[in-house]
């Protein structure tokens, strides 16, 4: 879990250019971290690559926050 | 100007007259090209004329095959930097006799497969922050044409779709444009009778049919690094037949 969270956090920090301590459990990519809707698509693409998983479009739409991403990826692995 | 060295192209409808001219124009500018189409033989023949070409046959009415095509192109070339949706079919009939099958088969191949290929290709373009999508529409999409309600709808649909995608991906260095050819000399238009040809040419101020190479040149321009600030537009190549 923590390993997944660290790797997800690293991707979010790199992609959105935000401070690491802003990337907390409930942080919404769009509302709290300044992402636009295309950024969320790119984040999902980056997660797929990092973790070698496929995230279908309907699941991708439910990944709105850092916590959502960690939860989804942990379950998918 | 217009140097495409190192760029990889996925081109559909490559076995047709206009497709071949597009392939030559982009290849001569330095690009590597994945040639797609339904008929393998003409694709192989075209590939033999080019130094850097791959043949990827695909039936555009098969959703799974279409969705797999961008991945196959990436496997063959390493990336898809330029996507040219040139494939198109016609199933002409007067509207009151047009069957649902005639309607949906044209929409499926001309519009829906374009949507699928755009989606598949944009992933990699977003990552590399560079991409060119050129959708080959038609003058008929803007003017209408009796007997072609399905074809005209599919070609007009391409324009609206391209503009919407252009909005969404502009910030990622990806441009999405259409080219709308008028009457172009191809094996398809060769079948017209002299009477048909002269009545068409009455409406073309240039007084002649266009050459496929003139469409290739327009594609090359929109694919080039120099056209980075052009997106969401339709370039009409029709000898003045419709000044839009």
Image (cartoon, coloured by chain):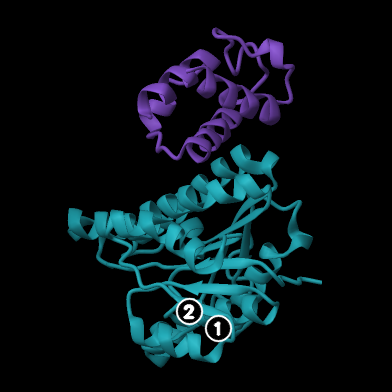
Place of residue A38 in the rendered image (x, y in percent of width and height, measured from the top left): 58, 32
Q: Nearer the viewer, residue A74 or B184?
A: A74
Place of residue A54 in the rendered image (x, y in percent of width and height, measured from the top left): 40, 38
Residues at circles 2 and 1 in contact by the CB criterion of under 8 Å:
yes
Q: Would you say A56 lies left or right of A26 here?
A: left
Q: Circle 2 sits in a helix, a strand or a loop, which is it? A: helix
Give the mark nearer the N terminus: 2 vs 1.
2
Which chain: purple?
A
What is the quadrant of the N terminus of chain B in the image? bottom right
Q: Which residue is mark 1?
A: B209
Q: Nearer the viewer, residue A26 or B19?
A: A26
For marks 2 and 1, give the CA distance: 9 Å
Dot 2 crowding, Cα within 10 Å, few <14, some 14–19, many 20+? some
Residue pictured at 64% horizontal, 11% vertical: A32
Residue pictured at 59% horizontal, 18% vertical: A29
Q: Nearer the viewer, residue A12 or B237?
A: A12
Q: Would you say B1 lies left or right of B156 here?
A: right
Quarter assignment of residue B3: bottom right
Chain holding disc 1: B
| Disc number placed over residue B200 in the picture, else none | 2
Dot 1 crowding, Cα within 10 Å, few <14, some 14–19, many 20+? some
Q: Between tags 2 and 1, which lies in front?
A: 1
Which chain: cyan?
B
């Amino acid at each position: 879990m923590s390993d997944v969270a660290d790797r997800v956090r690293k991707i979010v920090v790199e992609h959105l250019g935000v401070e690491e301590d802003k990337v907390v459990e409930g942080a919404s990519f769009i509302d709290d971290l300044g992402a636009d809707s295309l950024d969320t698509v790119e984040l999902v693409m980056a997660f797929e690559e990092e973790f070698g998983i496929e995230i279908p479009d309907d699941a991708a739409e439910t990944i709105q926050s850092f916590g959502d991403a960690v939860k989804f990826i942990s379950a998918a692995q | 100007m217009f140097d495409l060295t190192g760029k990889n192209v996925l081109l559909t409808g490559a076995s047709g007259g206009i497709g071949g001219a597009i392939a030559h124009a982009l290849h001569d500018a330095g690009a590597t090209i994945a040639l797609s189409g339904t008929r393998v033989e003409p694709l192989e023949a075209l590939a033999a004329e080019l130094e850097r070409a791959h043949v990827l046959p695909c039936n555009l009415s098969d959703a799974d095959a279409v969705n797999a095509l961008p991945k196959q192109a990436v496997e063959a070339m390493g990336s898809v930097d330029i996507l040219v949706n040139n494939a198109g079919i016609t199933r002409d009939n007067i509207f009151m006799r047009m069957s649902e099958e005639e309607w949906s088969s044209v929409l499926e191949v001309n519009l829906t497969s374009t949507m699928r290929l755009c989606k598949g290709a944009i992933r990699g373009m977003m990552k590399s922050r560079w991409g060119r999508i050129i959708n080959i529409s038609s003058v008929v999409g803007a003017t209408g044409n009796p007997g072609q309600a399905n074809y005209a709808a599919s070609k007009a649909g391409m324009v609206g779709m391209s503009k919407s995608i252009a909005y969404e991906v502009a910030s990622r260095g990806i441009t999405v444009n259409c080219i709308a050819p008028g009457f172009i000399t191809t094996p398809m238009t060769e079948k017209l009778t002299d009477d048909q040809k002269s009545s068409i040419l009455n409406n073309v101020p240039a007084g002649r049919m266009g050459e496929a190479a003139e469409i290739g040149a327009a594609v090359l321009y929109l694919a080039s690094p120099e056209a980075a600030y052009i997106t969401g537009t339709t370039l009409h190549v029709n000898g003045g037949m419709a000044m839009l």
